[in-house]
Image: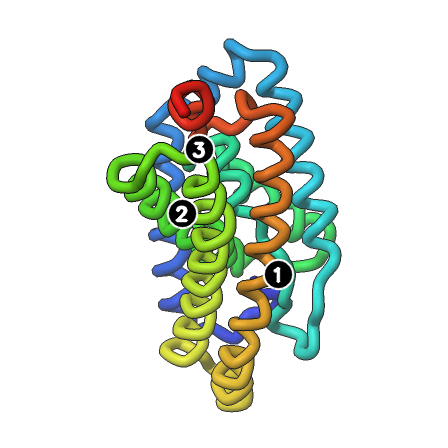
Amino acid sequence: MSFAQSVLAPWALLLTTLLSLCVMVWALWRQPWQALLDDTELQHRWLGATLAVVLMWQLRAQAVDWLTLHLVFTVLMTLIFKVPLALISNVVINVAMVMIGRNEWMLLGANVLVTGVVPATIIGVVWRLVDRRLPDNLMVFLFACGFFGAALATLGGGLTAVLLIIVAGTDPDAIFLAQEYARFLPLLMPSEAFITGMLLSILLVYHPDWVATFNDHRYIDTQ
């Protein structure tokens, strides 16, 4: 779910831009490009995955002009590349959406917050809990992070978008429709969870070393 046209008050646009900018400063401070410079194959995987998500974002449902429903893939990108690189990728994807005329420039901060910051934060917390609290088991990692984490992150991003419209919406009709759209979130959660879990399971079988949050020695070799 992301915004295509602005129905938010100026203060909300400014606030979401500042929040997204602060998170991106943190991501850049972690110097994620160092890993890209040191690993040519990682560069190819990251750029290829980013381009693939840009293409997948074109598959969207849009009943109103200002809001679109689509798969986000932020959870999968976070599990594969970790949070800093996933956030940078999300910014690149949102900028691409603006450049091809899908979204407005003024909504860049709000869209990065809804499709990037919130889902990446949620799956980051879920991954930490799985890593520290749950048994070292492949299926536990797959279902907790790939399926449950993706569903929870989709819910979090969707609720953030709906809450922004309810609190800072400038169009009464948009506020009403946002509340109606909230009912569709349970329909988005299984689809995002299924696609993320399926792709993650394929990677864990054939290329577990590509998933940065997965320790194949810990979850496979020691079992």
Q: CA distance from mark 1 to mark 3?
A: 22 Å
Dot 3: few (<14), some (14–19), or many (≥20) neighbours within 10 Å?
Answer: some
Circles 3 and 2, Cβ within 8 Å, touching? The answer is no
- Residue 157: image x %, image y %? 45, 61
Taking 31 as reference, is 183 left or right?
right
Q: Position of residue 115 (x, y in %)?
A: 51, 54
Tell me the residue that label 2 is attached to. Answer: 123
Instruction: Please name whichever residue, 30 or 216, is drawn nearer the observer in this view of the structure.
Output: 216
Furthest-front residue in this view: 223
- Locate the C terminus and report the quarter of the image it occupies: top left
Pointers 1 and 2 in contact (C-beta within 8 Å): no
Instruction: Choose between 131 and 70: the one closer to the eye.
Output: 131
Q: In the depicted view, which residue is nearer to us: 180 or 148?
A: 148
Please name the residue shown 61% across and 24% down the image. Answer: 207
Residue 110 visible here = no
Return the mark for residue 37: none
Q: Does 168 sit left or right of 65 as displayed?
A: left
| Quadrant of the snapshot with the N terminus | bottom right
Return the residue at label 1. 191
Amino acid type, label 2: Ile
- 154 to 43, vertically: above or below: below
State the mark number for residue 82: 3
Distance in Å between CA atoms under marks 1 and 2: 16 Å
Circle 2 SS class:
helix
The structure residue drawn at horizontal position 48% and vertical position 67%, both measured from the top left corner, is: 158
The image shows residue 67, relative to residue 83, as above or below, that is below
Among numbered discs 1 and 3, the one appearing first in the sequence: 3
Packing grade of label 1 (10 A; few <14, some 14-19, many >=20) is some
Direction top: furthest residue: 38
Q: Are marks 1 and 3 in contact (CB under 8 Å)?
A: no
Q: Residue at x 61, y 29 (%)?
A: 205
Of the two numbered discs 1 and 3 in the rendering, the one whose residue sits closer to the viewer: 1
